[in-house]
Image (spheres, rainbow, N blue to C red):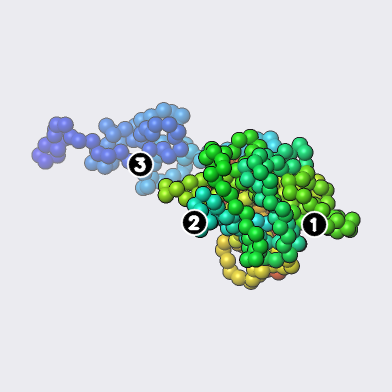
Amino acid sequence: MGQNQSRSRPNRPQQSAYPPPNIYQQGPQQYYGPDPQQMNNGHYRGGWHGPAAYPPMFPPHHHFGGPGTPQLPQQPNRPSFTPPPGAQEVKQTATIRNAVNLKKFTLALVPVEGQPSKLSVRFQVDASEPFVVSIFVVATEDAGKGCQITQLKGTPNEPIAYEKRLGAHFPKPEGPEVIIDVSLFEERQLTAVSGDTYPLIIRLECVSDKGKTESHQLKELKPGAPQRSWVQSQTTFAKLDKDEEGHWMPRVIKQKIWVEGTSYELQEIYGIENSSAGRSSADTGKQEVNPYMDDEERLCVICLVNERNTTVLPCRHMCMCGDCATELRKQTSKCPICRDTVDSMLEIKRPKATSKPAVDSAAAVTAAVNDLKLKD
């Protein structure tokens, strides 16, 4: 009696389909399993629903084995990443010794007391050689004439000599100041770059090793003169900004160095300050970092064992060791830090420091890179 009433119950709601949809099916998920119309109180009565190209999925209690048992579909292999020709090439650097460096975060403009339109230029320098300072206001650099600098109004200051030292302050306590009188210029001349004309140019120059052997001296240098092959220099280009209260402040645009007759534009490498490459003394060249210090900021972000020595370009994140960089470029075109597209990689050569032995296991490196999941 109860069975007849159960069989004649109208509009019986269908039970939820089991098992779940085929996880390997691409595109919109569909149900490939027992036809719900063939289910009765949870018992399968046979009949399959869905394209014949996809074998059925069986409930957990189904017993496999025997002839004719359908096999589950195999997971398709993930396509391997093939970098475009010439992309992500790992390049090695040649070391250039920079004897003078203006620490750009120290550059400041201090109003002269009682004369708000006049600003005193202030900054600090690290130098491993004696050097001279020349400052130019609203001046043009001509790269075709040995980076000659011409000031548009007035004359630049005479070069001011310094002995080698770290953290040398400009101006000297007893020395002359360089004053910018903003009232002599249009505001756009101070706040914008026009072609090769910059609001503020600061040049530091010293005699190179070659110049010493040829008996050259700093007193031979003239402000803004074309650079000589025996000179090594750093030039800082900046403009002026005005805040909401009307105070002037400098903003560094770029820095260039001149070494052995060639000019190079400096590019900041993010993360190098935490590596042993960024912690050397300018006058001794000795490493100041404790080689046994457990400092994760010095380690490769992938294997967390080797020290960082490879920079990703163009984003300039120094975040990997050479082994992981070599493996990474086979797997993906993304930077591990910012996920920007990688054009090439730059390996930074530096003095070897005594530290924990590097892990050279190719299997360990490959596993670490695969865990990044940066596939395109």
Task: Determine whether label 1 and label 2 are within 8 Å by CB.
Answer: no
Q: Amino acid at mark 1?
A: Leu
Task: Determine whether label 1 and label 3 are within 8 Å by CB.
Answer: no
Q: Is residue 43 visible?
A: yes
Q: Amino acid at mark 3?
A: Pro
Please give the residue where the numbered disc 1 appears in the rendered image. Answer: 218
* Lower sequence index among marks 3 and 2: 3
Instruction: Give the percent coordinates (x, y) of residue 348.
Output: 70, 54
Residue density around tag 2, few if under 14, some if 14–19, many if 20 or more, within 10 Å = few
In this rendered view, identify the residue nearer to me: 133 or 343. 133
Instruction: Give the percent coordinates (x, y) of residue 312.
Output: 62, 47
Disc 3 to disc 2, how far (Cα)?
A: 84 Å
In this rendered view, identify the residue nearer to me: 13 or 143. 143
Please state, as top left, top right, bottom left or bottom right, where the N terminus lies in the image. top left
Instruction: Give the percent coordinates (x, y) of residue 286.
Output: 72, 68
Farthest residue toward the right? 214
Q: Amino acid at mark 2?
A: Gly
At 51% from the left edge and 49% from the top edge, which residue is drawn? 117
Q: Is residue 327 visible?
A: no
In the figure, 115 relative to 314: above or below? Answer: below
Res. 19 mark: 3
Disc 1 to disc 2, how far (Cα)?
A: 36 Å
Please state which of the two labelled residues, at mark 3 or mark 2, is closer to the viewer: 2
SS at badge 1:
helix
Please state which of the two labelled residues, at mark 1 or mark 3, is closer to the viewer: 1
Please give the residue where the numbered disc 2 appears in the rendered image. Answer: 114
Disc 1 to disc 3, how far (Cα)?
A: 84 Å
Residue density around tag 1, few if under 14, some if 14–19, many if 20 or more, within 10 Å = some
